[in-house]
Every structure is written in C-alpha cells, then in structure tokens.
Image: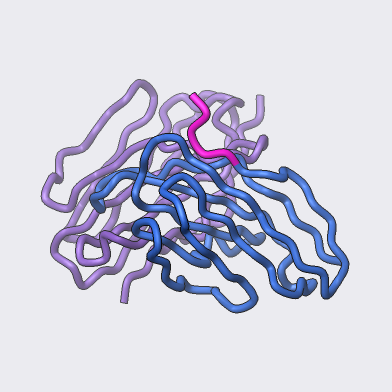
Amino acid sequence: AQKVTQAQTEISVVEKEDVTLDCVYETRDTTYYLFWYKQPPSGELVFLIRRNSFDEQNEISGRYSWNFQKSTSSFNFTITASQVVDSAVYFCALSEAYQAGTALIFGKGTTLSVSS
Amino acid sequence: NAGVTQTPKFQVLKTGQSMTLQCAQDMNHEYMSWYRQDPGMGLRLIHYSVGAGITDQGEVPNGYNVSRSTTEDFPLRLLSAAPSQTSVYFCASRNRGGNQPQHFGDGTRLSIL
C-alpha cells in the first residue's frame, strides 16, 4: 500500500543553520510522483516541487535542494542557511500513476521553527 | 487569478446541523478533491472527482457528501455535524495527469460545538 512517512515531527534551528527534512515513501507502482508543499503560519498550502519516479536528478532552487533516491525510497528536502521566513509545516506527498485520477497521499508533516 | 476559492473561511456549527462548504475553481481543471487537516494527521482525503458527474470516496468519507454538476464547482456537504468533524478543510484541483500539482484553496476552519 502507498504511504508517506515524515519521521521528524518538529525541528528547531537557529537562523543560518542548514536543515534537512526527511521523507520516505512506499508504493507498489513503478511510475509515481513526489511533491513537497509548504504551509506557513497563515495556513495556505504552497507547492514547492514535483519529482517524477524516472528522474533521479537532484534539484536546487536557491536555498532549497531536493535529494531523490529510489534505492532508499527517499525524497529529502534541504534548506541551506535557514531564515525565519522558512518557519512552516512542510509536507511530502505521493501520487501514483495508476491512481492518476485520485489525489495526493500526504505525510503527517514536519514543523520547522527557525529562530533568530 | 482566483484559482481555487473556498467559502466560508470560518464557520461554527452546533452538533446535528448541516451545511455545505463551497469550492470553485476557474482553471478548467478536471480533478477536484476535498481534504481535512487535523493536528498531527497531515491531510486526509475525503472525496474526489475526476470530472463533472463523477465522484468517489477517499480515506475518510463518512459523514460527508459531494456532487460535481459542473467542472468549476465541487461542494462538500456535512449531513449532520459532529464534534469529530471539527477540522480545517481544503479543496484542491489539478489538471489531468498524476504529475500535476494540486492547487489548494485557502481552507475553511470549521468548529462543531
């Protein structure tokens, strides 16, 4: 069965520290898609990144980077030089190709608190 | 640039009351979904629709009804509100294709007394 696990419930760091948010997924499908969403204190859900199962290239966008490893079923998210504005709940999510008509399977989220 | 619009933003109900949470999108997306978010539980799928006239149940459908008469609208009905339905509700839509990101509304915070 499909499942997304974010083992870190809460992480607290001081500004400028690097932080990695872990995501481990389970799926029986060979084609699937992984996503990260950010939920700031204001409550909205903001799409950050999508990764296809057949593309294992890592990605960097500014201070954000993502490490996708099929061998360990992980899709980890690193924030470099964290800032107070990064404080939010971060969700990892999975979408399976054979269930393309359905929605995302979310992890329970990691709450990141960045203090100045 | 409306995207996905949810109304109301906040609502307080008494146990046993019924109500409809509205969701509308203007992106011509085929797929729409309703989620509920509870502390420590992430987002859980209630119902979803792959097109007008087609709906199906998600992970936690009990106590909720949906319909999809148009592409744009996907209302969620609480038949007889219970305190266990106190939650934040998110509506989402996306294009066809499992790799398409969900676009979320701003959420409805619902309290059942």
Which is nearer the eye, B66 or B34?
B66
The residue positioned 25% from the left and 60% from the top of the image is: A73
Letter of the purple chain: A
**Residue B84 horizontal/vertical position (percent):** 74, 73
Letter of the blue chain: B
Which is nearer the eye, B103 or A67?
B103
**Residue B109 horizontal/vertical position (percent):** 72, 51
The residue positioned 25% from the left and 53% from the top of the image is: B98
Q: Is residue B39 left or right of residue A49?
A: right
Which is nearer the eye, B55 or B93?
B55
Q: Quadrant of residue A86?
A: top right
Vertical comparison of B16 with B48: above or below: below
Q: Is residue A110 left or right of residue B85?
A: left
The residue positioned 37% from the left and 69% from the top of the image is: A3
Which is nearer the eye, B58 or A89?
B58
Q: Quadrant of the C terminus of chain B?
A: bottom right
Vertical comparison of B19 with B29: above or below: below
Q: Quadrant of residue B86?
A: bottom right
Secondary structure of the magenta portion, mostly? loop
Vertical comparison of A23 with A63: above or below: below
**Residue B10 horizontal/vertical position (percent):** 77, 47
Residue B100 inside the magenta-drawn segment = no
Q: Is residue B10 left or right of residue B96?
A: right
Look at the image and give the residue range highlighted in magenta.
Answer: B1-5
